[in-house]
Each structure stands twice: as C-alpha cells, then as structure tokens.
Amino acid sequence: MAVRCDSNADILIVVDLQSPFLDHIHERDRVVRRATFLIEIARELGMPVIATEQAPERLGRTEESIRALLGSDDIFAKSEFSAGANERVMERLSGLTQRSCVIVGVETHICVCGTVLDILAAGYGVTVCADAVSSRSLEAHKLGMERIRDAGAMPAHTESVAYEWMGSSEHPKFRTVLDIVKRHPL
C-alpha cells in the first residue's frame, strides 16, 4: 500500500457532495472549501476525478460550485451507499492506470467509509482527506475516520496531499498550485 500520494498514481474520488446532504453536515463550509481546493489542484495536474451522486433524481445534484469543476463524464449516479459497490464507478476505475485513490465527500461514517472499504478490497491504496469529509455530527465523523484508518486507509490533510502530488518546488505546476493554495486558506 502506498503511503505517499502521487499525482501520477492517484485518482481523486468525490463522494456525494450534494446540496441536500451538505445542508446538514458538520462544518459544511469547510468540507466544500477543502474539496474544491483539491479538485482544482487535481484538474491543474491533469489527474482523473470521479464524482458520485446518491440517487440524484430524488436527492439533488452535486453542489453547484463543485459541479462547475467537473465534467459530465466525471459524475456517476449511484443507488449504492458505497461508490466502490457501483459497477460503473468500478469500471471507470479499472479502466485507469492509477492504483491509488484520494477520497473527499460525505458522509464519513456511511458513503465515504463504505467506498473506502470496497476500494481497499479491490486492491487500491486509499487516502482520505479528513478535512474534506464529514458527517451530520462530529461523533459520527470521528467514528468513521477511526474505522477508515483501522481498515488500512491513510488519513491526510488536503494541503499535504497537494504538496505530495507535486513532490517538490521544481514541479512545473508549482507556481500555479501555490496560487490555488493561497486562494484557499486553511
């Protein structure tokens, strides 16, 4: 299992950042802000991004500010709680050369955790950005993160992932990514 994030090896997975869910999420604004930050950087670095929507016909679409950063081919509707249990998501993952996933989204103890468990079981390395996931309560978020870590996924902060993706200040996109970092304060 990889313990360091790598822009050539990682896929960013955005789990269910839909407006109806976000309205009830603990520290909602932080989750949206930090997920947006990481999506912008993944896009700048040319990385694959997969986003899911839980029953969007009933529960609504991805938050508009986040959806604006995604292509229509990046968003997968699902009825399963785990993105890793969705056949179309797993087909997309298996069609990519990358073998590690970085995950952001909601809710930590349900859809994020289930996604982590299924993607780990499929043989991928997994990093979960603790500052870009949450639940309706802090307790549920903490329990979800404990289970995620115990299952073998690595917790990380979005900013540490961004810098690991670049590797050094010699990265050709360093200045552009640094501008994104400055626009998204912690």
Image (cartoon, grey):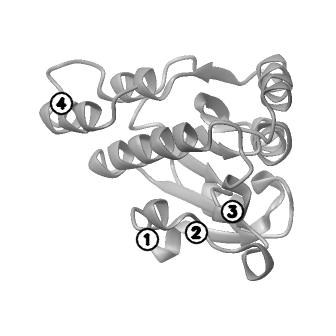
Quarter placement of the N terminus: top right
Cα–Cα gap, marks 2 and 1: 7 Å
Secondary structure at badge 1 equals loop
Q: Earlier in the sequence, mark 4 or mark 3?
A: 3
**Comparing marks 4 and 3, which lies closer to the viewer?**
4
Cα–Cα gap, marks 3 and 2: 9 Å
Q: Residue at x 60, y 42 (%)?
A: 104
The residue that mark 4 highlights is 174
State if disc 4 and disc 2 touch (CB < 8 Å): no
State if disc 3 and disc 4 touch (CB < 8 Å): no
The residue that mark 2 highlights is 75
Query: Which numbered tag is attached to residue 30?
Result: none
Above or below residue 100? Residue 48 is below
The residue that mark 1 highlights is 71
Q: Earlier in the sequence, mark 1 or mark 4?
A: 1
Q: Residues within 10 Å of mark 3 (few under 14, many from 20)?
A: many
Q: 133 or 97: nearer the eye?
A: 133
Secondary structure at badge 4 equals helix
Cα–Cα gap, marks 2 and 4: 28 Å
Q: Earlier in the sequence, mark 2 or mark 4?
A: 2
Residue 116, located in which quarter of the rendered image?
top right
Query: Which numbered tag is attached to residue 89?
Result: 3
Residue 164, located in which quarter of the rendered image?
top left
Cα–Cα gap, marks 4 and 3: 30 Å
